[in-house]
Image (spheres, grey):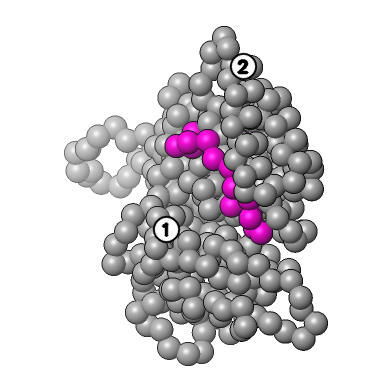
């Protein structure tokens, strides 16, 4: 998951209120329920030491949601009397929670706030291709490419023919001439479609490309795409009613996400097995991860939310690379501010600052990081 949207949470040091609210229950008495929920959360924050201005900001946000329609849940991150970030959640939290600490409590977002990737759908055929953008905001046309290798240039097969005797007829000669010409035109069309699709992806910053069409045409466009985009592609044989339904787009996105997650876990397992100095590789465990974060070497952070290392205490300073397993290790000349924080939240802060993605690991296994925390490292 790309957590760049969390940058505002790390622009200021100091204590944060982190609130997760289930908003899936909609009844006639919802305003009254919101008031009770807000009061309960504010009391919890007061017990933890949150200042009055921040408690008031949380109360107002819970009682007056900005989202319409309301999502399954909300996460609120507030400090100094202001709600800094209020992302909607794709899943309801198991319970309403409120925490107060030196870092925002963001690990639950990995599971609750699913990525809503922009999908660029290409409907590919011999007549060309039509592009469509699909996202949580709906769908919109994104251009088209008109092909030159149209079906009428092809000579359809009429089944097996008897063996010919004598020289080929003019029709036979014509058939053998037109088919290669049509195929050559289609090959050029496929390249043009792939180029246009790559340009559209660059312009729209689409996270996933979905190729829809018959096998040969679809594969020809896929093979013409830049190699850097190939791991962003999902392929479907056709859509329902000519266009993909929302659930078909979601199924393609979910399947692609599972495949990528599995691939990243395999890459982590292989890197961990090879190890060795000099570049790449993988590490696991709090001590090794803290060292890698300080050296800006984390390329991708892996977290299993229920892993025993996630809630281990580490020490942090004001900057993302100021973290250590002991307070004395962190102390530096002139540095006066230190806080104890959860290891997962401290490492996510470092990952966000470094522009590294974070992968949520949902199941324990030999290929997953020991203790629930691991990282693929940048090459040095």
Mark 1 vs mark 2: give the one in front: 2
In this rendering, position of residue 333 left or right of residue 71: right
Q: Which residues are magenta?
A: 87-105
State whether residue 324 is above or below residue 349: below
Which residue is pictured at 39% across the width and 63% down the height?
Answer: 308
Q: Is residue 201 visible?
A: no
Report the magenta stretch's main SS.
loop
Q: Position of residue 151 (x, y in %)?
A: 48, 34
Residue picked out by circle 2: 32
Q: Secondary structure at mark 1?
A: loop
Q: Position of residue 256 (x, y in %)?
A: 43, 48
Residue picked out by circle 1: 304
Between disc 1 and disc 2, whose residue precedes? Answer: 2
Which residue is pictured at 74% across the width and 71% down the height?
Answer: 337
Q: Crowding near pointer 2: few (<14 within 10 Å), some, many (20+)?
A: few
In what quadrant of the picture does the C terminus appear? bottom right
Kindly give the residue lying farthest to the left in the view shown.
162
Which residue is pictured at 60% across the width and 40% down the height?
Answer: 44
Q: Is residue 104 magenta?
A: yes
C-alpha separation, residue under disc 1 versus residue under disc 2: 37 Å
Q: Crowding near pointer 1: few (<14 within 10 Å), some, many (20+)?
A: many
């Amino acid at each position: 998951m790309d957590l760049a949207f969390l940058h505002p949470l790390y622009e200021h040091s100091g204590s944060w209120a982190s609130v997760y609210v289930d908003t899936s229950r909609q009844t006639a008495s919802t305003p009254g329920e919101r008031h009770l929920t807000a009061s309960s959360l504010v009391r919890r924050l007061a017990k933890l030491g949150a200042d009055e201005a921040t408690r008031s900001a949380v109360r107002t946000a819970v009682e007056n949601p900005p989202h319409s329609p309301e999502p399954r849940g909300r996460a609120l991150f507030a400090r100094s009397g202001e709600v800094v970030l209020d992302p909607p959640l794709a899943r309801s939290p198991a319970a309403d929670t409120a925490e107060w600490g030196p870092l925002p409590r963001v690990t639950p977002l990995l599971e609750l706030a699913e990525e809503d990737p922009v999908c660029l759908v290409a409907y590919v055929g011999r007549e060309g291709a039509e592009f469509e953008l699909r996202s949580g905001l709906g769908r919109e046309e994104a251009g088209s490419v008109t092909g030159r290798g149209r079906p009428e240039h092809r000579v359809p097969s009429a089944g097996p023919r008897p063996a010919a005797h004598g020289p080929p007829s003019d029709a036979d000669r014509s058939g053998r001439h037109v088919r290669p010409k049509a195929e050559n035109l289609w090959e050029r069309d496929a390249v043009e479609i792939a180029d246009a699709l790559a340009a559209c992806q660059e312009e729209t910053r689409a996270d996933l490309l979905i190729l829809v069409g018959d096998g040969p045409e679809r594969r020809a466009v896929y093979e013409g795409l830049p190699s850097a985009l190939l791991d962003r592609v999902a392929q479907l044989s056709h859509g329902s009613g000519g266009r993909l339904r929302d659930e078909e787009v979601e199924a393609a996105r979910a399947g692609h996400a599972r495949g990528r997650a599995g691939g990243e876990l395999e890459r982590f397992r292989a890197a961990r097995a090879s190890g060795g100095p000099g570049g790449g590789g993988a590490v696991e465990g709090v001590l090794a991860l803290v060292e890698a974060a300080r050296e800006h070497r984390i390329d991708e952070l892996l977290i299993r939310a229920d892993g025993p290392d996630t809630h281990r205490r580490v020490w942090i300073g004001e900057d993302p690379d100021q973290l250590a397993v002991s307070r004395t290790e962190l102390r530096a000349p002139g540095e006066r501010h230190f806080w104890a924080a959860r290891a997962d939240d401290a490492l996510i802060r470092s990952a966000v600052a470094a522009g590294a993605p974070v992968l949520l690991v949902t199941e324990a296994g030999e290929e997953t990081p020991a203790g629930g925390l691991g990282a693929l490292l940048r090459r040095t």
